Image (spheres, grey):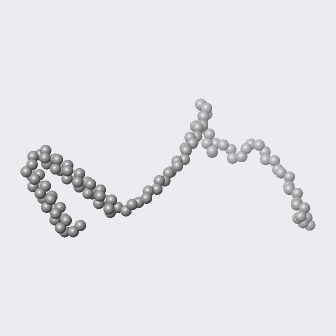
Amino acid sequence: MNKSDLNDIQQALNLIRTQAEEADSEAKVEILALLNGTSQSVIQMAKKLVKPETKTKVVTQYKDKLIKQKPKVVKQGTPPETATDLPATPFQAIKPQAPMSTLANQQQPQ
């Protein structure tokens, strides 16, 4: 856009301003609405010229399903069990296992 184009636009806007000053309030509202609509369309056109086209990519995000644990049923009159309340080993005796026999390809101890 060169200087003469800008001067022409400025002269047209000055003409509109002088006519709007002479008009009544209803005409002023209509003039402002027309100017607003014109400026919005010019802004949209300028944005299209300036803005490079971008490709959009749709990415879907999957959410994990939450599994709610059922609350532990506590009998009335007994305190709740925690990990520290339980014994570390069972009360049954641990039975020893027989030693494993040597493999055939290994040497016998002397």
Residue at 19 percent across and 65 percent down: it is: 5
**Residue 49 location in percent, x, y?**
32, 62
State the image quarter where residue 78 is shown. Answer: top right
Q: Position of residue 8 (x, y in %)?
A: 16, 63
Q: Residue at x 90, y 66 (%)?
A: 107
Indicate the position of residue 41 as horizontal and vertical percent values: 26, 54
Look at 63% across and 45% down and name the residue there: 84
- In the image, taking residue 33 as reference, residue 78 lies left or right, namely right
Q: Position of residue 95 (x, y in %)?
A: 81, 47
Foreground of the two, 21 or 98: 21
Task: Please tell me which residue lies in front, 89 or 7.
Answer: 7
Which image quadrant for residue 42? Answer: bottom left
Q: Give the quadrant of the C terminus.
A: bottom right
Q: With 86 as the anchor, is 29 left or right in this view?
A: left
- Left/right placement of residue 56 relative to residue 2 reads right
Q: Residue at x 19, y 53 (%)?
A: 35
